[in-house]
Amino acid sequence: MKIHEYQAKQIMKMYGISVPNGSPAFSPEEAARIAKDFDTPIAVVKAQIHAGGRGKAGGVKLAHNIDEVKYYASQILGKVLVTHQTGPEGKMVNRLLVEEGSNIEKEYYLGFVIDRETAQVVMMGSSEGGMEIEKVAAEMPDRIFKEYIDPTIGLMPFQTKRMAYNLKFKDKVIAKAQKCMMDLYNLFVEKDCTLAECNPLVVTVDNKVMALDAKLQFDDAAIFRHPEIEALRDEAEEDPKERAAAKASLSYVNLGGDVACMVNGAGLAMATVDIIKFYGGEPANFLDVGGDSTVEKIAEAFRIMQSDDQVCSVFVNIFGGINKCDVIAGGIVEAAKVVGLKVPVIARLDGTNHEEGRRILKEANLPMVHAVQKMEEGAELAVKLAAELKAKRAEGKEA
Ligand code: GDP
Ligand code: MN
């Protein structure tokens, strides 16, 4: 789960990390009211969207007086920002952060993520702050320093010291930089983060170490332990399909292609995404219906998959274990009744009760449903039928 920069800064502040004074604003007037109380000559007006790269896209502006604050706020609010992290469709700005301007001496990068290879949290730092860290990693990998953290002992002071020297913080701020690393690590662990990042972390001319930008992401599987984080959710920023899926306890990730898939088990779901690619198709989603499927849940899964306009076929790939093929088949029939099948459905049902499942589908006699025996056969057909429907749609001949 992602949250906004201003929310991340509030949490960082609770952990002892310095952040600029500021508040969220939802209108130009509110932005002006907030900036009136600032002590600094410059106010910063920042678009709040769940994506970075706002600066380059015109979503971060330095204002020199209240009129400018109002002007920039009115320019940014309601605008669709397209950054390297939003995708081409961009994201609409509904909130701003208005904060006191900082007098920056130097920008750094500081971040924590989980490294899956070592199964450890890794602290990453760079003196090339402010720019895209992906670019630094690709072009100047030697400028990124890493410290792997043993989960049984946590981040050690020698590691924060080594990082501070690697990034060449000046003597006056070394202790502050080390403390900032420790604070951010504690936050990362206690709040079950998957990412905690300051890009840039800055040293100001008056020797403060501050998080000028703040990004936190949380492990969805651990959100139940943090109702205070759940309360920060901004549904306007989330994919409505992913939201509906979470409510129905379906594990769904939008992948943007045109072959939807409905699978049981994360392993088979990944294999299904792979095999669709193998046959030259683009998976529209990853969808694991889990092990406790009901007819209603399957019907809801169909509603969600078909609400994606790009979807041109649905590949149902089920290996019945705890899930029973007759229940899945019942779900498809139910979906056809309540939701309606708008695209071809390729059903491969194998495992527990597959004879019964296949019988149910056969008797329902649904023209959109193609029953197949094998996974390869199903994937190939799903890709083929999706391509056909796509071509038809492109010609505008769709019925
Ligand atoms: P991002 O582009 O979405 O990552 O947004 P950031 O919050 O990182 O802001 C982009 C850039 O704006 C920063 O790297 C800074 O160079 C600049 N910036 C942000 N706040 C201030 C500020 O208070 N003072 C100055 N001088 N520059 C700022
Ligand atoms: Mn940034």
Image: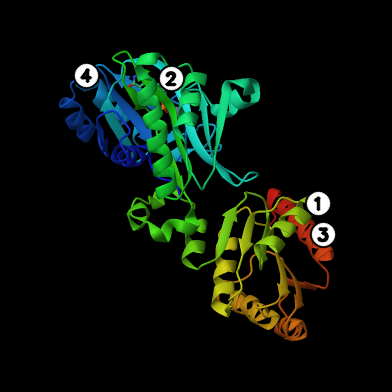
Residue 102, horizontal then vertical, whole percent: 30, 20
Q: Cβ–Cβ below 8 Å for labels 3 and 1? A: no
Res 32 seen here:
yes
Q: Amino acid at mark 2?
A: Glu
Which mark sits nearer the N-terminus, 1 or 2? 2
Residue 107's disc is 2
Estimate the spatial distance between the alpha carbons at disc 4 and disc 1, rounded to whole Å: 58 Å
Residue 274, horizontal then vertical, whole percent: 75, 53
Way the structure is coloured: rainbow
Which mark sits nearer the N-terminus, 3 or 1? 1
Q: Cβ–Cβ below 8 Å for labels 3 and 2? A: no
Q: Amino acid at mark 3?
A: Glu
Label 3's element?
Answer: helix
Which mark sits nearer the N-terminus, 2 or 4? 4
Closer to the camera: disc 1 or disc 2?
2
User: Split into 4 quadrants, where in the image is the C terminus?
Assistant: bottom right
Q: Which residue in the protein does label 1 denote?
A: 278
Residue shown at the point (48%, 22%) measured from the top left: 129
Q: Cβ–Cβ below 8 Å for labels 3 and 4? A: no
Q: Which residue in the protein does label 4 denote?
A: 40
